[in-house]
Image: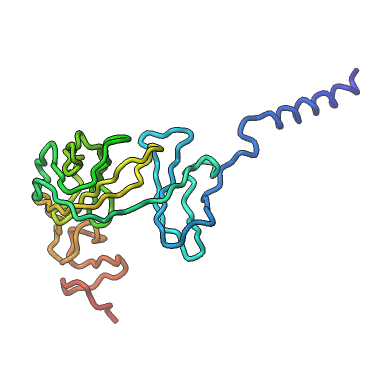
Amino acid sequence: MKKLLPFVLLVFVLAAVFVMPGCGSSSPSTCTFHNLTPGVWYRVFYSFPTTVPPIVETRIANSSGDITVPSHGYQCYNLQIRAVTNANLTLSASPSSVNLASPPSTVTITGQSFDATYGMPQVEYFADGYMVGAVTANSVSGGGTSLVAPVPDLSGVYSGTYYVRVTNMTSEGYYLNIVGSASMTGYGNDRPDSDGDGWYDDQDCDPYDPFYTNNCTTYCGGGQEPITICP
């Protein structure tokens, strides 16, 4: 019996190793899709397991018809990829000028081709090329020429010009049919330059010292930026 004990323990340990959850199921860091149409925009939906808010990556297929996206911890076979269409229509928004410190509760966007057949359109707000908010429209007019949508939290947006993009939902439940965009102007939240050296605080390695440049590598007297490296 003493001779069998080590063998039994070894079998138990091996069995435990093979039944441990997650063994061999680590996710890759990226996922690559092939045989797509070069130059076409695609959206990748991380739909399983469901995330709130959902994760979506948008890429344009390269000359070989490939796109690569981060896995976000998902298995690549759980991702859904769909082509994006873009009518690229010029839309208009009212109000077209918004006080960022006290924005309106809703905005009305006019144009054409707004479609709520499969769900209310999505309205995305962009500033400096980055999406700063996304909402679902409250209503769409009968002729699809206007919609009313809530205004997202714009407290982190600086004064300047930004745009609002409208995308219709497809029968599959994905936002893929871009209608177009409208320009808007935001005011009341100017980008700060605390030390007055010409570099905004979010670009300046020391926003309260005018003798430091934004490259954060050189210190030299003179008080002007960009500065000259002292010999």
Quadrant holding the N terminus: top right
**x and y percentages locating residue 212 in the rendered image:** 23, 66
User: Picture coordinates of residue 10 (x, y %)?
Assistant: 80, 28
Q: Nearer the viewer, residue 173 or 107?
A: 173
The one of 159 and 91 positioned closer to us in this rendering: 91
Quarter of the figure that contains the C terminus: bottom left
Looking at the image, the residue that sits furthest to the front is 143
Looking at the image, residue 106 lies above or below residue 205: above
Query: Does residue 150 appear anywhere in the picture?
Result: no
Left or right for 14, reference 98: right
- 13, above or below 127, in the image: above
Seen in the image, is 37 located left or right of residue 53? right
Task: Residue 85: give x, y in percent of width and height.
Answer: 35, 52
Q: Which residue occupies the foreground of this view, 22 or 117?
A: 117
For this orientation, the residue located farthest to the bottom is: 231
Query: Residue at the spot x=16%, y=45% of the render?
Result: 109
Viewed as shown, does residue 82 lie left or right of 224?
Answer: right
Q: Quadrant of residue 197?
A: bottom left
